[in-house]
Amino acid sequence: MLDRLLRGEPGALAICALALVATLLLAGWLHLLYWTRRLRHPLEYRETRRLETGDGATIELRRAPSEPSAGPAAEALPPILVVHGIAANHRNQDLTHDESLARHLAAIGRDVWLVTLRSGLAPTSRADARRKTFGAMVAHDLPRAVDEILAATGAAALDYVGFSMGGMLLYAAIGRTVPVARIRRAVFVGSPGEIIPYLPLPRALGRLPAALVPTLPLRVGARAFAFLSEWFSTPIHGLVVNPHNVADGVTRLALVNVIEDMPAALNVDFLRWATTGGEVVLDGAPVLDGLAAIDAPALFLAGSVDRLAPPAAVRRAFEAWGREHPALDKRFVILGRDYDARHDYGHGDLAVGARVGVEIFPLVARFLGPEAAGEPHRALTGGEAVCEVERRASRR
């Protein structure tokens, strides 16, 4: 064979090329397998439910482990639904026992459920892939999850916590596919009211035929490069998180346990909005226009250096929410050094930042907690690592 290769015989060259390709593929597979197993961080849940939606797609619900009761006040509160963002699964706000808003809330006695939307599950067919749109999740995934939780708990309403796209889905669903009466309180973590791309995008991208918009294979890429993600910082790091605000090892864990592909059908939706002024439109109507009459109290959190959901974009939703109710309890909070946080917050670190356990989780817990039991909600101060724009700031 070596003699044939040295003589340059086509057959020998082809065999060597195939052998090289096979070796590289095997090496890549072994590399992926090794780092996935090493960095996988499984968590236990009270139960897992796999549900079919009205259009034939699938979602999953997981119930966080119960903790010792925090007393009658906590037991009287409704269940909480936690909804992840784009290119993520239910682990978005449940990465580890420490970096988990879900487990923080469960530890104080709340009944917490985490959903994995259709966008966070691998497609089972081409038809299933085509169903992974923003509109389909609004029409089917959210109402299905809400109905299941209320039926399982006997509650009349629930509290909602959405991260990034998870909050955007409620902007579009509340009062449309999810009755307002079923949402007692809502928390939006880095959920923009409009899509403001960090870099200008050509309008032509938004006009691409859907068939030409690809699925972004982020799952494999994230797992393949997780091991070196903390060796150095790239512009991508700054786009997704503030690397200085994340503890060692957390980025690697997030890349392996949280990140999923970005479905082509969902990419089409976001590209269209990003290249046509940023307004989120569903069924021909601007989503934010439907929020004026909402009367559910809401908390909006924004990272001071968030490039995916900058404070101005989150504030758009804050101003639209409950505009017809001037006395509505709604609050806008920016997390950053200028507002007495230890570090400036980017996007992903709103969920897994080094100090979320003291700068974000208690803030969310207080907003969702004692008021329903008749306790006054204590005003939040800069000394608690937040800056709050009070409930009527949208009118100033």
Image (spheres, helix red, strand yellow):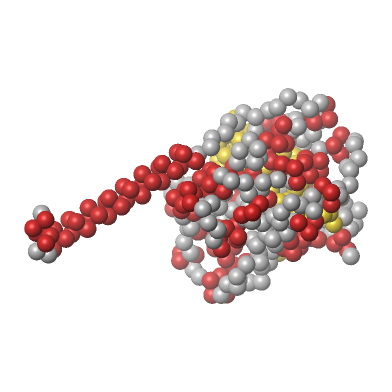
Task: Compare residues 68 and 137 and report the one nearer the observer.
Answer: 68
Compared across the picture, whether 310 is left or right of 122 comes to right
Q: Is residue 90 above or below residue 168?
A: above
Quadrant of residue 153 in the image? top right
x, y (%) of residue 110? 74, 33
Classify 202 as above or below 139.
below
Q: Position of residue 10 (x, y in %)?
A: 13, 63
Q: Is residue 341 left or right of residue 1?
A: right
Q: Quadrant of the C terminus?
A: bottom right
Q: Residue at x 71, y 36 (%)?
A: 104
Q: Nearer the viewer, residue 60 or 374?
A: 374
Q: Is residue 199 visible?
A: yes
Is residue 101 rendered to the left or right of residue 120? right
The picture places residue 232, in percent across and down from the top left corner, at 53, 56
Seen at 39% across and 46% down, the residue is: 31
Residue 258 seen by the camera? no
* Image quadrant in which the N terminus is located: bottom left
Q: Residue at x 82, y 47 (%)?
A: 384
At a point 50% along the width and 70% down the height, the residue shown is 208
Number of disc labels = 0
**283 left or right, relative to 390:** left
For this orientation, the residue located farthest to the front is: 231
Q: Position of residue 32 (x, y in %)?
A: 41, 46
